[in-house]
Image (cartoon, rainbow, N blue to C red):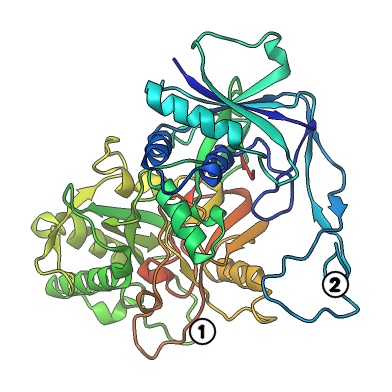
Amino acid sequence: MPFRITVHLLDPAYQASTLDRGAAEWPPHPYRVFCGLVSVADPQDPVQDAALQWLEQQPAPTVRVPANTAEAASPRGAWVPTNAIEKAKPSHGVLPGRTAGGKPKVWPERTLAEATVEFEWPTEPPAGVHAVLEMLAKSVPYIGRATGHAFVHAAIRPADENTPDEGRWQVWEPADDSGTTRAETRSLRAPHPGLLEGLRWAHEQGQSAYQQARPHPYVLRGAVAEDEELPAVQGPFSDLLSFAFPPGFSLDPALTLKVTGAFRSTVSALLDAAGHDVDAMVAVHGHKAPGDDRRLCAFVAYPFVGHRHADGRLRGVGVALPADLDPAHRRALLAILLRSGGGLSELAVPSVSEPIPLTYISTGATRTDAIRTVRPQRWTRPSREWTTALPMVLDLFPKGHGREIEASVAASCRLAGLPEPVTVEVLHSGAYTAGAPTLPARALRRKADERPLPARHVRLRFAQPVTGPVLLGSKKNYGLGLCLPTHLGEKPA
């Protein structure tokens, strides 16, 4: 029987905001419930840890919310005490119960017709685990903002148990990555394996809990596929040739630039051995003359991301061919990569002791776990929203001491041959996509004397679907800034 956690809000309002604080979060993210359980658990109690670890290993839960809700026209505001962590002599400008700047704190909220939200996992927990989770749930004082007081209850419910008058409720269900377009699709943060350890580590390091979150696509039960779609905008690349590492083999994402640099060198050597004039192939070697606006080939490495078990490690490589590539050069690349001598079959990387065997993965390859990460369509599917799987290195230093970093990312989109994004979201640390790695500074430069440009994980939304692959930033031709498409029509939550 399913395991359900029910949240009874004491006020008919849910107070929590999206990551960009631009709107009220809706529906509530399952991640918040798990964080609430962790916050009241005893970190020295192995029994409680075992119960929380059981919960984080389960599939993402279904979320059941009131159908009739409305977001407040203007954010709620109040004077709040300043969080002082160091003793300092107060001045006349610092008054009890208000911030030093004399401005009230504001936050968005959602008014609910029914003050109840439910999270349901499909698996029945062992009796001991259920008892611990029920005890922890009763101790959770609020969900969302600290003013969102609630009674939280955990119980095992029959699978066919329904609440009367189902028309008053909406049910959001976890979705797969099939790419099916739904009228209502959103990305919710959900528990994932290793989250308990990550939250404890973040607390010790003074980091925010949201930095340990991993988004999961959700669809509204009963929503139908959209009948009409906006036409897709063709991105700067026309082909993506993908090669998988052997099953079970992966590389540290910090080696991305070494892997893609070795891949480019290998391609150049193969072209030279086949009798082609590599010096004339600007798209391959990348050394353009001033004023040359032709696009370059992008050599990429595929990280395992976007899955609750994702670890960010590299599972294969690929080369994206620009749409304006000389037809003769395109034929030469296809010949040495796919046909001559059996095609590209191995890759020597300087930091790896033996050459890595490679297997070509065509666009029509069957969907299996072994090649899922390196299937071309995973990275080329048209989408309005794209999120970095590997951090992008900015093309330019942001102005205003870093305050205009969104404008710098938008400029990188234009430099990459992409449309102007409608919205740009940038994280100072962490990532939006599950498993997307944060790379050390040494992994962001090909040469020691390169400028130390900032690297960030970003999320872009375009007015129309854009065809991938999408790569951003100063290292886009070496795979950094590789983006993953999300479901069409996905709304921020």
Picture layout, residue 382 above or below residue 453? above
User: Can you tell which mark lies on residue 146?
Assistant: none
Picture layout, residue 457 above or below residue 264? above
Q: Which residue is drawn at 22% across and 69% down?
A: 267
Residue 451 percent location from the top left of the image:
46, 87
Q: Type of residue at label 2?
A: Gly
Mark 2 crowd level (few <14, some 14–19, many ≥20, 10 Å Cα): few
- Point out the frontmost of discs 2 and 1: 2
Residue 478 percent location from the top left of the image:
36, 70
Q: Circle 1 — which element?
A: loop
Q: Quadrant of the N terminus?
A: top left
Horizontal arrangement in the rendering, residue 430 relative to residue 478 (left or right): right
Q: Nearer the viewer, residue 449 or 413?
A: 449
Q: Name the residue under label 1.
A: 291
Mark 1 crowd level (few <14, some 14–19, many ≥20, 10 Å Cα): few
How many marks the image carries: the answer is 2
Which numbered disc, 2 or 1, marks the residue that appears first in the sequence? Answer: 2
Q: Name the residue under label 2.
A: 101
Q: Type of residue at label 1?
A: Gly
Is residue 51 something one can see in this rendering? yes
